[in-house]
Image (cartoon, grey):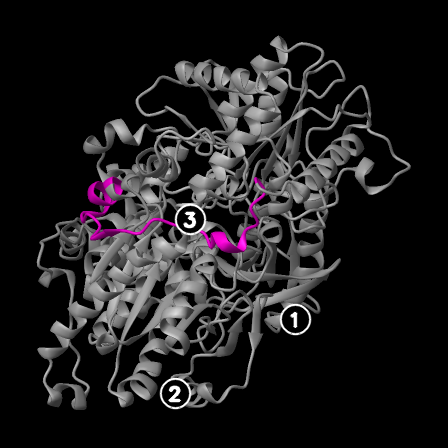
Amino acid sequence: MTEAQEYYLFEVSWEVCNKVGGIYTVITSKLPEATKLFGERYFVLGPDLKTNPDFEETDEECWNRVREGVAIKEIPCRFGRWKVPGRPKAILVGFGKKYDKEQLLFRIWEDYGVDSIAGGWDYMEPVMFSYAASEVIETIYTSVVRPQGMRAVAQFHEWMTGAGLLGLKKRAPEIGTVFTTHATTLGRTLASHGMDIYTTMDHISPQREATAHNITAKCSMEAASAREADCFTTVSEITASEAKNFLGRPPDLITPNGLDIENIPDLAADRTAALKSRKKLLAAATRFLGRDFPADAKIMLISGRGEFRNKGVDLFLSALGRLNQEMGPDQTILAFIFVLGDYTDLIPSLKSDDVRPDPGNPPIASHRLRYEASDPILQACERLGLKNFPQNRVQVIFVPAYLNGHDGLINMTYYEALAGCDLGVFPSYYEPWGYTPLESAAYAVPTLTTDQAGFGLWAQHAVGKNSGIILLNRLGQPDEAIENNLHDIFSDFLRRDEADLQGMRVGARAAASQANWKDFFKHYEQAFDQAFAKSLSRAEKLTAEDLKAGMKHIFAGTVSVSPYFRTFTAVANLPANISRLRELAHNLWWAWNPRARELFSALDPKLWEGMNNNPVRMLETVSSERLLEASENASYMNLFGQIFQQFDNYMDDKTPSPLIGPLDGLKRSSPVAYFSTEYGLHDCLPIYSGGLGTLSGDHLKTASDLNIPLVGVGLLYKNGFFRQVIDKNGAQTAEYPENDFSRMPLEIVQDDHGDAVQISLELPGRTLFANIWEVHVGRVSLYLLDTDVARNTPQDRKITGRLYCSEPRTRIEQEILLGMGGVRVLKRLGI
């Protein structure tokens, strides 16, 4: 970037001041280089989740004009600095109160063809955040940047910020845009479901697979963002091939991830800190299992996302299971698994020194897991005989908590614990880049990676043969051969003496030193410059009069240089004379009125059956041609008139049924409140399991028919009750399919500004928040509480995950939420 081409840089990510995964490391580790190049012309924007510990609000003068601009646009923001090296200017963007969600989604559909119909709240929140962030960028550009005669470039990370890129391109086309995907949504999803995407990629239908896995909205946003960006980048050759096949555009540049290596101590040259960490790991193992371990025990580590297959945890344990049966009595492996899991608290023996581990049933996990019976790590250890008995040569220690120095067992940060290990094992099946193996090598730990990891391929080509980087061949290999290879690598490693290990440490550190941001940041500079050049060219075509008048220039996919063809699903615009079908679809009165269901089944009987008799999905899916035919069909319209006459008469009748006695003291302003953990109203609302649900559902239907003033209160489960399936071996397994609330007959309760109405409860050490959803059951309303909201911790978001989960603590939290929270719902709604 030359001085003549100086510009402002904006960087937008869901992980700014919000540590979730690898993108947080990407951004924070390259901040010193970014701030060195752009200085005070660099801004980062992230979501305001009210729990951003790395953020420091400031009253600097530079924010004054920006504050005024965003206040006019009614976008709530906090302005300050990100408390990480480089301390860049940071803006946390509020996004819950700004937009009419339906209008926003329609606008993105109309301009860029993004199919958002199937998007749930985990889609809507990032869309609203990033679109609001684009308005903040536009405000800074018009009030600060343009008056200086300067330009700007904005970088957007992942599909979660795609709406911002699209919105900015339409409203401020003079700003250059960069879109970076670190892993395609479809690639990660298919890999986690066991599909060999690398050998079958050319034969995969992105649209069909996205629909099958209920990720259509995310994939559509991702593809549109890649297509419309001035510069599209990704992190490795692996994701480049995914982008070409799944997103329809190959990346313009590869921007590999690096580290600020100079701020990481060279633990190959000075082993003091590493040896201190090693002693702490041995002490933690002793405390965990209640027995001492030899000083020369080999300490292995695997870490990363909680993706059992994608991260190769399955292979790691399988190879260790074989070694456990082969190793001699003078050999010991301590295998630490640092993978975040859904846990409640420490196991009893770690809570108190008075409680000792049970020698007859040694622990595997340091914390009590919410879904212990179905945890794949615990299941694999049981199957492979890795049970941590004293006679076992391999001891597995699974820590599902975040290592911040206060986890209760390791009590070191992740990097301190990493430094004490002998071997970092990352046999990933799906690893677009691979920060964990890079960090392992940077801390002078001999490191195993694979040829299906971006880092592994980079190391193979950039570093070549290196004693500190072990490459496991996975591409195109059968599972048995891969496991045999990993087993042989482990066996060879056990035979190495200290001199060999020191040589490997030196090699690992040397390899990581070549992945330094001082060398890698130039790739990002190229991306920014390319986007800047394109924005200059585009700006030249916009006349000064256009800019002064604020004319809207639309750069939709239909005018892209490269045509991009795609089939989209949109909500049908119902013909005016049958538009009330949508109203009826959202009132379960049809569930116990067979003739009402005929209005939907008559549209397309086969489709109706395929939609599981769900009229909401039916109206989203049925063709506009068929709707038009029905609206012009005399027989159908006659049925339509009869049903709605019956429905309107039913809903308008406020008189209690003569079948019941006087309702003394009961009135609609103070109805009976009916609380239940489950309601069986219809198959399309799977929040029930059996008899209690059927009883509760029938109570609501009967109260509606008898015109009894009553409201129901319950919980809205993201995964509902488990579904039993038979696998290929004939064994019964439990599946918890995720419910898509946007395709069910319920609606989130909103206030006058269109914001979700929430209640809150104080739980030990934290506040729990819950959204309120309403189901219309004839004349009766059912209110359901949902804790899957951004303000909650990851564990609390799962309180309403499963009906009748096996974890006692979660059951208690569900009961507290239903009882105390249900009362607060009634008060909040004025009932």
- Image height of 23 relative to 237, above or below: below
- Whether residue 760 is visible to the viewer of this picture, yes or no, is yes
Residue on which the image places disc 2: 69
The residue labelled by disc 1 is 827
Secondary structure under tag 2 reads helix
Question: Which residue shows up at 57% across the image and 31% down it?
Answer: 502
Q: CA distance from mark 2 to mark 3?
A: 37 Å
| Cα–Cα gap, marks 3 and 1 | 28 Å
Give the residues drawn in magenta, as a range: 241-268
Q: Residue at x 12, y 50 (%)?
A: 565
Q: Nearer the viewer, mark 2 or mark 1?
A: 2
Whether the magenta-drawn stretch holds residue 261 is answered as yes
Q: Which label belongs to residue 740?
A: 3
Mark 3 falls on what kind of element? loop
Circle 1: residue type: Lys
Q: Is residue 722 above or below residue 152?
A: above
In this view, the residue in front, 750 or 308, is 308
Relative image position of residue 706 (x, y in whole percent) = 56, 56
Above or below, 437 against 181 in this view is: above
CB-based contact (under 8 Å), mark 3 and mark 1: no
Q: Quadrant of residue 670?
A: bottom right
Is residue 110 visible in the rendered image? The answer is: no
- Which SS class for mark 1? helix
Three-letter amino acid code at disc 3?
Asp
